[in-house]
Image (cartoon, rainbow, N blue to C red):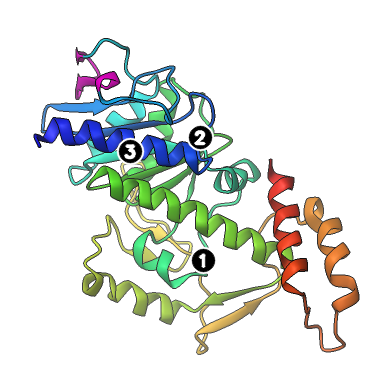
Amino acid sequence: MKAEEQARADIVEVGRRLWERGYVASNDGNISVRLDDHRLITTPKNVSKGFMTPDMMVIADLDGKKIAGERDPSSELKMHLEVYRNRPDARAVVHAHPPTATGFAVAGIPLDRAVLAEVITTLGSIPIAEYATPSTQELPDVVRKYVKAHDGILLANHGALAIAGDVMSAYYRMETIEHFAKISLVAHTLGRENLLSREEVTRLQGLRGMYGIASPAPICTDDSIQATGGQLECQVLQAPDSDERLVASTSALRASTSALGASADKHVDKHSATDGEIRLTYRELTALIEDAIRALK
């Protein structure tokens, strides 16, 4: 199968998966694949990503000018072009609105805490790009700061962006962003979080090569953000300096838990032990998670 035909088929498949998982609604989201040094193929505007066909795709040059296709390209093509201009290694971009991750973006909470080993080795940290009006030049302008250092970015009050060397990998990174957000939400709701230490983060970063994972930038475990020309050069990850691999944190995340507090209290009050440990049945934990997700919708 030719590269263009494969790209069309892959975009249709990724769109279907995004729609089936509830990462997009209506005509939300957009997907693109760089075909070569001069062209890309992208989803059209005003089409549900769950019901696309290969012939709907649009081919454009890297200046955004349409080359082929009966439809108009995605209204957020400018954001994709900004990624490709700044990331020669990037061959695909997926933009969606996964509910939990977008909830973090709306709350202004980046997914930048050292919690899950798998996320540290694959994505590092997931920052939030400042709010910009969708489909305008503002959006690529704010994304530019983060694209050189990050493969996953939250867009304030908007959604999420995933970057990779192929479109299926970009989709899987979107899955990881949403999965991480869900786990972080549960820990936040329970009011407790164990963070990985800086030393453990360094150890995990060293495993990237063994796993065959290429990262656009190293991880920084402090707040000394390095930037050149307004673009980040490292991934800032919040990790405590400790001799222990896991460090308990009761402050969990930086946002208020007031919206979820009543739900949590309903489930945990009668199970609080004198040693401060909270014990829940599987049914109660499931109900707690469902309440938390409903609170973000």
Q: Quadrant of the C terminus?
A: top right
Check disc 2 and report the residue beneath it: 24
User: Total marks drawn?
Assistant: 3
Q: Callout 2: 10 Å neighbours few (<14), some, many (20+)?
A: many
The reply, left or right, for residue 110 in relation to residue 95 is right
Q: Residue 78, position in %: x, y? A: 33, 24
**Residue at the (18%, 42%) spot, across then down:** 88
Task: Return the residue nearer the eye: 70 or 52.
Answer: 52
Q: CA distance from mark 1 to mark 2?
A: 29 Å
- Residue 168 vs 205, above or below: the answer is above
Asked whether residue 253 is in view, the answer is no
Q: CA distance from mark 1 to mark 3?
A: 35 Å
Asked whether residue 250 is in view, the answer is yes
Task: Return the residue nearer the eye: 271 or 281.
Answer: 281
Which residues are the magenta region? 55-68
Check disc 1 and report the residue beneath it: 238
| Disc 1 and disc 3 in contact, CB within 8 angstroms | no
**Residue at the (27%, 59%) spot, across then down:** 215
- Residue 232 vs 197, above or below: the answer is above
**Residue at the (42%, 81%) spot, across then down:** 199
Q: Callout 1: 10 Å neighbours few (<14), some, many (20+)?
A: many
Local SS, label 3: helix
Q: Residue 1, position in %: x, y? A: 10, 37
For the residues carrying marks 1 and 3, which lies nearer the camera in this image?
3
